[in-house]
Amino acid sequence: MDAVDILKTCLRRWYVMLPILLGAAGVSYQLVGSQETTYTAATSYGLVQPQLPVSASEADRNPLGADGKALVGAALQAQLNSQETQRELGSAATRGWGPGQSANGSSYSVEIPMYQTTYEVRAWGQDAQAVREVVDRVVAAAPGITDELQSRAGAPAGVRYKPFILAATQVEALPSTSAAKLVVAVMGVGVLVGAAWAIVTDRLLGRRRQAERTVTSSSRPVLRPAGPRPAPSRPASTADPAVPPLRQRPPRAQPPRGGQSSLRR
């Protein structure tokens, strides 16, 4: 079956295609109407430690800074991403994952971007003011949480790491899916589904008609003319009555045995 045959089948079974196309049009209209603009707010911060004098002893060093600032940075990131801090600083109007990412129930995210040593705080949502406020609250709470973590580790006050803001909070609107592309995609799926059902319906109805024709032809009675049945005819004689029968000649008399010898005597 080529494209021309499929087109003829769809036109012949238009009553199957039409409801499916109308349904696809309704779905595309609902999807276009339900699209909302998504906003994302982000800022970055880093950690800095005061320089220690050369004569500083081991007791003057920060226990969380034995491996540079990686340990204190990891502790701060884990504390900010914890559920308790998320409930305290987050909002129900924001989320911590963007388009194409897995949902994790967070209100914001604190991560280290690839090939960078700074920390990024980001939030997504449909309200631009809400995402900005959440990011600002997280950044404002970062110094206090950092100081609390180092206090529990016994770090001296003069050698503690302090976060500092690298850039102000920026809010951006994410581009939504094009309405034209969405309608074309949904209607394309509707055409394919409608064509498939039209072909299936055409095949089923064709088989049904063929079965009905077979049953009708096998059950049709044989019609005979009304009236008395004619008597069976006898086989006609091959002899012609106008021609008299040939007369048979009598058989010739056979001479007796030994006749010639009796005559001679």
Image (cartoon, rainbow, N blue to C red):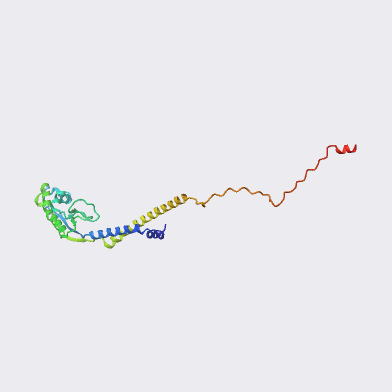
Q: What residue is rendered at 33% in x and 59% in y? A: 18
Q: Is residue 157 visible?
A: yes
- In the image, residue 88 lies at what x, y percent? 13, 51
Q: Nearer the viewer, residue 114 or 216?
A: 216
- In the shown orientation, is residue 252 left or right of residue 127? right
Q: What residue is rendered at 14% in x and 51% in y? A: 87
Q: Is residue 60 visible?
A: no
The answer to which image quadrant residue 51 occupies is bottom left
| Quadrant placement of the N terminus | bottom left
Farthest residue, direction bottom:
180
Q: What residue is rendered at 36% in x and 55% in y? A: 197
Farthest residue, direction right:
265
Farthest residue, direction left:
157
- In the shown orientation, is residue 230 left or right of residue 142? right
- In the image, residue 62 lies at what x, y percent? 13, 49
- In the image, residue 146 lies at what x, y percent? 12, 51
- In the shown orientation, is residue 106 left or right of residue 210? left
Q: Nearer the viewer, residue 63 or 77?
A: 77
| Quadrant placement of the C terminus | top right
- In the shown orientation, is residue 40 left or right of residue 200? left
Q: Nearer the viewer, residue 20 or 114?
A: 20
